[in-house]
Amino acid sequence: MASLGYIQVIRTCNQECRFCSNPPTGKIIPLKDAKKHIDSYIKKGYEAVLLTGGEPTLYPDLSDIIHYAQKRGIHCLIITNGQKIADMRYLGLLVDNGLDHIIVSIYSYQNKIQSFLTKNKISLYNIKKALRNAEKLKITVDIATVINKYNADHLDKIVKWLVQRFPFIKHFIWNNVDPLMNRTSKNPDTIPRLNDFELALHKAMSFLESHGRSFRVERVPLCYMSDSQHCSTEARKIVKQEERSIYFLDKKGYVTQKGYRGFLGYSKADCCKACSLNEICAGLYAADKYYSLAELYPVFVSKENIVNKINGYGKD
């Protein structure tokens, strides 16, 4: 796992996702401050900086930040909902300034569900245009999906749909929904039980593995990771002891996570003490408030084998 730095550049968005973890506040980072954060990440020896929001493509100085990062020699990515980069001219401008890697958020291959979750009827239409644009411009694309109640039963179908239509996509990221955020707490219907997505996630991970794709999974305890525990974001942080720093445009400010440090809000059940993976599992996030510790169970597989896979497996 590489050490990564994140910068929220804007807290405005052109969608209204029902589980948004960083809802709009209207705040925006001054360009000079963004450059200072990039310089700080470079001094720390970080491999890449990721620009996020809100929706970073709404930030007026986005191309300038990307150009600055490229000039300073640090890899720069954006995490986007894909709506604005459906415009080839705009995406071309970012590419001309050094952008070569994007992470696109998609929640379903079904237009009805994608539209419902984002409150944007043309969300999926624009994402498909954005992905075709990225392919034409030879940009690396990762896919990020928030696991929620409405896609929990077809996570595997989402990745199959993407791989079949956009075979250039090689890396996928799942984040179980964060129920502690304001938007999600107002829409508790989006919060799944762990066993709601267990089967579909297993099928999705198996499909990607068999098709030569890499993937990561966050906020999912290792007992629900089937035989892919080495792809857990938290387990990899614990084993590799590498940092992730995030600059938030709110009261959280600057947050650094390393190993177990920074894993706030995670808990474990009594049965976890018997689990062979207890030492490399962060546990269950938001336990017994939105998720139930009763859903956890011990597994008895080789921790050493998983640690070895983490230390020698794939990309981050």
Image (cartoon, rainbow, N blue to C red):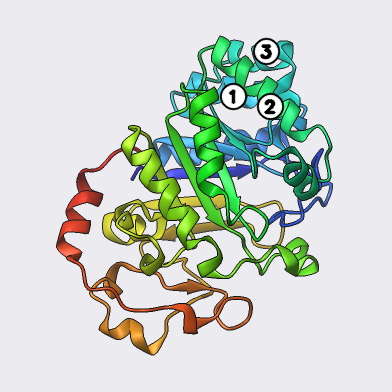
Q: Is residue 8 left or right of residue 227?
A: right
Quadrant of the frame with the C terminus = top left
Disc 2 secondary structure class: helix
Q: Which residue is tagged 1? A: 66
Query: Which callout, 3 or 1, points at the residue further toward the start of the chain?
Result: 1
Q: Residues within 10 Å of mark 3 (few under 14, many from 20)?
A: some
Q: Residue at x 64, y 40 (%)?
A: 106
- Residue type indicated by callout 1: Ile
Residue 302, position as x, y percentages in the image = 17, 65
Quick check: 202 above or below 35? below
Q: Which kind of residue does numbered mark 2 sit on?
A: Leu
The image quarter containing residue 283 is bottom left
Residue 300 in view, yes or no: yes
Camera sees residue 316: no
Q: Which residue is mark 2?
A: 62
Q: Secondary structure at mark 3?
A: helix
Point out the frontmost of discs 3 and 2: 3
* Callout 1: SS: helix
Question: Which amino acid type is marked by label 3?
Answer: Leu
- Do tag 2 and tag 1 residues touch (Cβ < 8 Å)? yes
Q: Indicate left or right for 40 with 272 as reference.
A: right
Q: Residue at x 40, y 69 (%)?
A: 282
> How far is disc 3 from disc 2 in space, using C-alphas?
10 Å
**Disc 2 versus disc 1: distance between alpha carbons?**
6 Å
* Circle 1 Cα neighbour tier, 10 Å, few/some/many (<14 / 14–19 / ≥20): many
Q: Position of residue 25 (x, y in %)?
A: 82, 52
Foreground disc of the pair 3, 1: 3
Q: Which residue is mark 3?
A: 93
Q: Are marks 3 and 2 in contact (CB under 8 Å)?
A: no
